[in-house]
Amino acid sequence: MVTRIALAGNPNSGKTTMFNKLTGSSQRVGNWPGVTVERKEGRLKGKEDTIIIDLPGIYSLSPYSPEEIVSRDFLLKDRPDAVINIVDASNLERNLYLTTQILEIGIPTVIALNMMDVVRREGIKIDVDKLSKALGCMVIETTALKGDGVEELIEAVMSAVGTRSEAELRYSKGLEGHISSVREIIRGNVPEELERWYALKLLERDEGFKNDIERDVWDMIEPIVSSMEEKTNNDADGIIAEERYALIGKIVGDAIGGGNRKRKETMSDRIDRVVTDRRLGIPIFVGVMFLIYFVAIETVGGWGTDMLNDYIGDTLMPAAEEWLIAADAAEWLTGLTVNGIIGGVGAVIGFLPQMLVLFLMLVILEECGYMSRVAVVMDHIFRRFGLSGKSLISVLVGMGCGVPGIMSSRSIEGKTERRITAMTVTFIPCSAKLPVIALIAGALFGQSALVAVSMYVIGIICILMSGVIIKKWKSFAGASSPFIMELPPYHMPHLSSVIRSTLGRVGSFIRNAGTFVLLACVLVWFLSSYNWSLGAVDAADSMLADIGNSLRWIFVPLGFGDDWEFTMATITGLLAKENLVGTLGVLFSPGSEGEGLWGIVGGMLTQAGGYAFLLFNMICVPCIAAVGAMRSELGSWKDTAKAILYQCALAYTLTLVVYQFSTIFFGDGPEWWIVLAVIALAGLIYVLVSKDPFRVGRREQDA
């Protein structure tokens, strides 16, 4: 018989680390049936018949977000054999709110009092015996990161399986009287072990449970709720929330001695006073990102990239060509291997040193706890544009890859914000776009880190503008959702975790280069080496050149349409953004006369044209995999098509404006396209400042 144990807790409570400790490598990841919320489960180490189900990180079981609905339904309907509730011991009062709701369901529960190392460093002493007695369940001290207490936790939860939960939290006499009255009314309508849970939910007027109770029964409950509200002059859900926090305050006060309860100011607190300041937070973030890209692109990473590119272009490609000629290989095979595979894939792999340094530094920022502060700093700005701080969390995830960035939008409670975030998160450069940034920065701007930072700033601006624009569409109107986020204390990154995360991202980059980029380079080589009669020709007379020349007019107003090569690179980049560099590597590898890819690109594009080429490809449609993830989150191909059209339109408009106006200040003077740019800019400004036709409806929802 299989035993199922649910793992539940707040975000940043150490739940994922504990899940990894309990299951090791026996993990499976998918989606909950019918819901696009990640489902993780694995077998308990050493016990093949015990499955650990990792519920989404949530703050309560009130059914507002998809994650909360999934967790509530699993605990209520699937009824696991036991629950391990991960509680951040350094934030007891906030974490125990979810604990009270879990205990009310009546499933045998063991509390893992996690991050005890942090608590001890802060000088706080928790009486675990008093806490366990007050909550009516076992409490085990743990530090998941170090593995402390994990074995004791396993023993405790296995002993709890098959037992009856003895936990029954007692609120004030007044609320207990209302709970008893409702339980009498609903008795026989719900399972006996869930009577107290349903009574509380119905007293809260929780719409998610009305359908579980017959209409006439609910009519009998309504006078009790109204009476409770009249006596306290408060909403029913607010009354119960206050009761929960009052009980939690008493429990925590008893478990933590009065003299010890006052939390000492920590180094994290002192740092946060600066980095989360509304005036200083954003400049600090921009400065940090500039420093990262300065190291990754201009200095350490740039030096490594220069050496690797020199080796590929000056040593590897000539050596491979000489070897194939000596082996009497066919001319087409030599061209495919040297120019198609090594030239194309090598152009992408050549940026690996910069990617490695960049990934390493970003992982360190995430591990030490800084990135969560960025979300808090940006929340008040995002909220002004109809989004929330959680949208920025998706953006930060999307810096690694657009697919998980889109999927992470599931954590946003508001449906409208969730869908807008899924549509726009790919405006931020992901790892696949970094080789393109490095190419243009190296070819035209002396490897300046400012080029990379500007792409991130523009990406954020595009997301904010989209929050205003898209919410004016009828199907996307809606109120903003609240933003709640725990800030984990700063800590030294764990070496093994940093190495694992960095190598995972680098491995993904290399896999893409060896699969999507390789296939695209082979196709580009074939189309650029033969004409429509399949005769071998120069690239300028090839099938690819014909396709590019027939389409390049589209990009002439943007400054990079004079050469068909950049048109075809843009098109192949729709499959995977690394293909942009791979395509140019294939097309420019022969006949370079010792001039590398950077030199050729720098000679064909002006600085304004090169920046426009980069800007358009950063904002327009992401890769095929990201489009598929967008379809999953938006729910239909119709809405996905709208999102793609919007991305293309915004990319074209901004690039047109940026390029045409840049020719006034940095070029030989504007062309007649400047008229189109002025019209496009005026139209964009009008859309941004025009009255929101659905604003009244949103105010009513907010009220």
Image (cartoon, grey):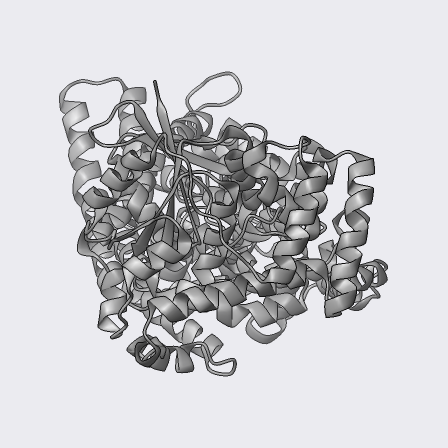
| x and y percentages locating residue 430 in the rendered image | 44, 50
Instruction: Please indicate, yes or no, whether residue 638 appears anywhere in the rendered image.
Output: yes
| Residue 276 higher or lower than 458, as above or below | below
Q: In which quarter of the image is residue 387?
A: bottom right
> Could you tell whether 348 is left or right of 313 in the image?
right
| Residue 537 higher or lower than 366, as above or below | above
| Residue 546 higher or lower than 111, as above or below | above
> Could you tell whether 473 is left or right of 489 in the image?
right
Number of callouts: 0
| x and y percentages locating residue 128 in the rendered image | 29, 59
Choose between 348 and 218: the one closer to the eye. 218
| x and y percentages locating residue 51 in the rendered image | 34, 29
Choose between 211 and 611: the one closer to the eye. 211
Q: Residue at x 31, y 32 (%)?
A: 514
Q: Residue at x 68, y 54 (%)?
A: 178
Q: Residue at x 44, y 47 (%)?
A: 167
> Could you tell whether 701 is left or right of 65 in the image?
right
Q: In which quarter of the image is the C terminus?
A: bottom right
| x and y percentages locating residue 284 in the rendered image | 41, 77
Q: In which quarter of the image is the N terminus?
A: top left
Choose between 590 and 23: the one closer to the eye. 23
> Could you tell whether 528 is left or right of 619 in the image?
left
Instruction: Please indicate, yes or no, whether residue 650 appears anywhere in the rendered image.
Output: no
Q: Residue at x 30, y 48 (%)?
A: 17
